[in-house]
């Protein structure tokens, strides 16, 4: 007698194979989505911090001189004799309650250069290098590190930026 249809064992084997394929595909899609979100967060933080760093670089490059330099702040006089201060308040803890930023003060008015709502500054350092002989500061090395405030775990990453600004001689 000829047998029509499938046995229970054959159906269970097919279901097991499909379940295995679905598990592998869903795992790949999940890890791909995590990678995409991490990349988006990294780009967002890098853009915001690069914008802030670029502004500080331009102001410092044309400065007449540095008047004070600490690890988290630098005071300088602009090309048109205005007093500027760039400072940051880094924190290793980064969550929705953390309030860190890079800020600039011009003649007493303070503006934040990084987005307080979405970015944490986790490290910040200004290093002023004097010339070989006594005199004004020759260059300033700026190191910034930040991360996205709204993400945690595998989707979050720290972005590090570093630059050295050579001051023009007036």
Image (cartoon, rainbow, N blue to C red):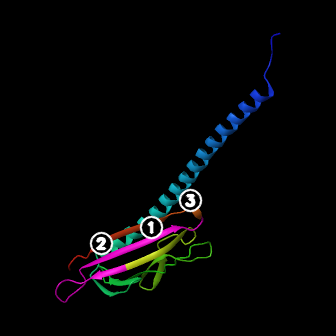
> In what element is the residue under mark 3?
helix
> In what element is the residue under mark 1?
helix
Numbered disc in front, either 1 or 3: 3
Q: Is residue 63 left or right of residue 12?
A: left
Q: Does label 1 or label 2 sit earlier along the sequence?
A: 1
Residue 140 vs residue 64, the one in the foreground:
140
Q: Which residue is mark 2?
A: 164
Q: Does label 1 or label 3 sit earlier along the sequence?
A: 1
Image quadrant for the C terminus? Answer: bottom left
Q: Is residue 18 left or right of residue 162?
A: right
* Residue density around tag 2, few if under 14, some if 14–19, many if 20 or more, within 10 Å: some
User: Residue 53: image x %, image y %?
Assistant: 39, 70
> Which residue lies at the image location 39% right of the left edge and 67% below the top edge?
161
Q: Is residue 97 left or right of residue 60?
A: right
Q: Tell me if label 2 and label 3 are in contact, CB under 8 Å.
A: no
**105 versus 159 height, above or below:** below
Question: Is 142 colored magenta in this rendering?
Answer: yes
What segment is highlighted magenta in the picture?
Answer: 126-150
> Which residue lies at the image location 37% right of the left edge and 86% below the top edge?
70
User: Residue 94: image x %, image y %?
Assistant: 56, 73
The residue sitting at the top extreme is 1
Q: Which residue is mark 3?
A: 155
> In what element is the residue under mark 2?
strand
């Amino acid at each position: 007698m000829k047998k029509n249809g499938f046995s229970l064992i054959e159906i269970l084997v097919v279901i097991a194979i499909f379940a295995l394929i679905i598990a592998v595909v869903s795992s790949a899609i999940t890890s791909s989505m995590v990678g995409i979100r991490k990349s988006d967060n990294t780009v967002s933080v890098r853009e915001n911090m690069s914008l802030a760093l670029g502004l500080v670089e331009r102001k410092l490059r044309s400065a007449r001189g540095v008047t004070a330099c600490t690890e988290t702040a630098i005071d300088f006089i602009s090309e048109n004799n205005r007093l500027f201060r760039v400072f940051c308040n880094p924190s290793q803890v980064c969550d929705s309650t953390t309030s860190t930023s890079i800020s600039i003060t011009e003649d007493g008015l303070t503006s934040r250069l990084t987005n307080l709502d979405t970015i944490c500054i986790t490290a910040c350092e200004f290093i002023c290098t004097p010339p070989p002989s006594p005199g004004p500061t020759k260059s300033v090395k700026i190191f910034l590190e930040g991360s996205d405030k709204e993400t945690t775990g595998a989707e979050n990453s720290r972005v590090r930026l570093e630059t050295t600004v050579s001051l023009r001689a007036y």
